[in-house]
């Protein structure tokens, strides 16, 4: 059974920073790509950033240069450091992990709210 537990969301002023974390429990399954997605009210879920098992990263254009994704393979965790946050970054952020039991769509966390407002 796969479990993803996210933490680190909250309310922050524009220009501020937050760090999201996702702890993954996948038993004996192999973990492949880990990533973060977000969904703002009235909008579709969109990719924020992904990181492969080898450390290759991919970012949405809107967060390039402001967000940094990282992973700790020994602890099965993935983090998203978000700097210079903007009101348009407000959304529910979801962790996604592709693993041996679901290598294409992966498994999702419950989501954590990030609100950027003065």
Image: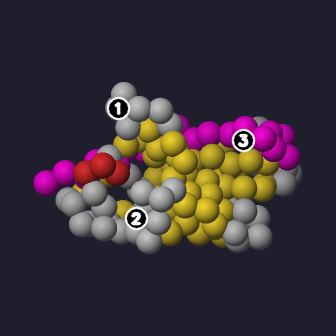
If you read the primary sequence from the N terminus, does the residue marked by circle 1 or circle 2 appear first?
A: 1
**Secondary structure of residue under mark 2:** strand
Circle 1 is placed at which residue position? 41
For residue 85, which quarter of the picture?
Answer: bottom left
Binning the other alpha carbons within 10 Å of mark 1 as few (below 14), some (14 to 19) or many (20 upward) gives few
- Residue 11 belongs to the span the image colors magenta: no
Dominant secondary structure, magenta: strand
Q: Position of residue 30 (x, y in %)?
A: 84, 54
Q: Position of residue 114 (x, y in %)?
A: 34, 49
- Gap in angstroms between the C-alphas marked 3 and 1: 23 Å
If you read the primary sequence from the N terminus, does the residue marked by circle 3 or circle 1 appear first?
A: 1
Q: Position of residue 21 (x, y in %)?
A: 51, 59
Q: Which mark is residue 106?
A: 3
Q: Is residue 84 left or right of residue 35?
A: left
**On-image quarter of the N terminus:** top right
Binning the other alpha carbons within 10 Å of mark 3 as few (below 14), some (14 to 19) or many (20 upward) gives some
Binning the other alpha carbons within 10 Å of mark 2 as few (below 14), some (14 to 19) or many (20 upward) gives many
Depth check, mark 3 against mark 1: the one in front is 1
**Secondary structure of residue under mark 1:** loop
Q: Is residue 36 left or right of residue 99?
A: left
Circle 2 is placed at which residue position? 82
* Residue occupying the point 55% across, 48% down: 47
* Residue occupying the point 72% across, 41% down: 106
* Residue occupying the point 68% across, 40% down: 107
Q: Is residue 58 left or right of residue 90?
A: right
Compared to residue 68, the image places residue 62 above or below, namely above
Which residues are the magenta region? 100-118
Q: Position of residue 89 (x, y in %)?
A: 34, 51
Compared to residue 39, the image places residue 58 above or below, namely below
> Which color scheme did the rendering employ for the protein?
secondary structure
Compared to residue 90, the image places residue 31 above or below, namely below
**Secondary structure of residue under mark 3:** strand
């Amino acid at each position: 059974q796969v479990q993803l537990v996210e933490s680190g969301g909250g309310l922050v002023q524009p220009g501020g920073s937050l760090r999201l974390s996702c702890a993954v429990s996948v038993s004996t399954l192999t973990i492949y790509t880990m990533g973060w997605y977000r969904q703002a009210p009235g909008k579709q879920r969109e990719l924020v950033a992904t990181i492969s098992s080898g450390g290759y990263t991919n970012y949405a254009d809107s967060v390039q240069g402001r967000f940094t994704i990282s992973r700790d393979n020994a602890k099965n965790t993935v983090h998203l450091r978000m700097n210079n946050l903007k009101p348009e970054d407000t959304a529910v952020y979801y962790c996604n992990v592709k693993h041996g039991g679901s290598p294409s769509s992966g498994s999702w966390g419950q989501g954590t709210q990030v609100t950027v407002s003065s």
